[in-house]
Amino acid sequence: TQLLEQSPQFLSIQEGENLTVYCNSSSVFSSLQWYRQEPGEGPVLLVTVVTGGEVKKLKRLTFQFGDARKDSSLHITAAQTGDTGLYLCAGSGSARQLTFGSGTQLTVLP
Amino acid sequence: GAGVSQSPRYKVAKRGQDVALRCDPISGHVSLFWYQQALGQGPEFLTYFQNEAQLDKSGLPSDRFFAERPEGSVSTLKIQRTQQEDSAVYLCASSSGGGARYEQYFGPGTRLTVT
């Protein structure tokens, strides 16, 4: 069974601060995705990384896939209140379904 | 051009009642997935369809859970004799291809509360 562990589980920061969320596994994934979910809504795809060592940037968000394709990180620069939400990493391996981490609840305070 | 839609958005059922949850995937999407999400947790896989074929139902927690997609488009997740532990958000996702690398797009979910 492939498991993904996310840390931290909860994160509360002031607007303008930087933060990093981690997603780790002992298993290799063929690709890894990051989602953001707001209350009462489904997860919304932010990015997909497929190559070990890959770095993708989406405005103030930087995503990195580990060289061994077992871990990933999400870094947010100068967080804004609109970044508040549940951040989920999800990996796909041999099976078609996604394996999700337990999520990081981010609160950005004004 | 609409996204994945689900209905109802909220459902309250008394313990022992049967419920049916509907998913309308993005038009033309081959694959359809159902996930269950407990409060404050990540979604967990329930079952997967490719067109009308249910290829994987390994995540269904018991034989009270049943899913179908008879025409390869709309899908229904049915839960018989609901129990309190079935309370969760049920998410549907669709993707354009059958491989693991095709991105999944999620609906807003159905929040089921069993009283």
Image (spheres, helix red, strand yellow):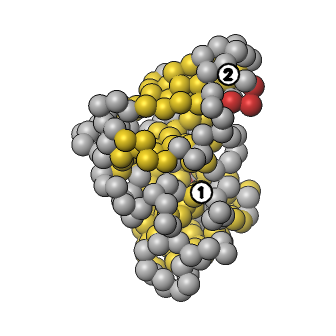
Element assignment for label 2:
loop
| Location of residue B83 in the rendering, given as x and y in whole percent from the top left corner | 73, 24
Q: Which residue is mark 2?
A: B82
Q: Secondary structure at mark 1?
A: strand
State which quadrant residue B73 falls in. top left
Packing grade of label 2 (10 A; few <14, some 14-19, many >=20) is many
Q: Is residue A110 above or below residue B78?
A: below
Q: Nearer the viewer, residue B56 or B36?
A: B56
Residue type marked 2? Thr
Viewed as shown, does residue A97 lie left or right of A85? left
**Label 2: chain letter:** B
Q: Residues within 10 Å of mark 1 (few under 14, many from 20)?
A: many
User: Residue at position x 52%, y 56% from top?
Assistant: A98
Residue B44 shown left or right of residue B104 in the figure = right
Which residue corresponds to mark 1?
A100
**The N terminus of chain A lies in quadrant:** bottom right
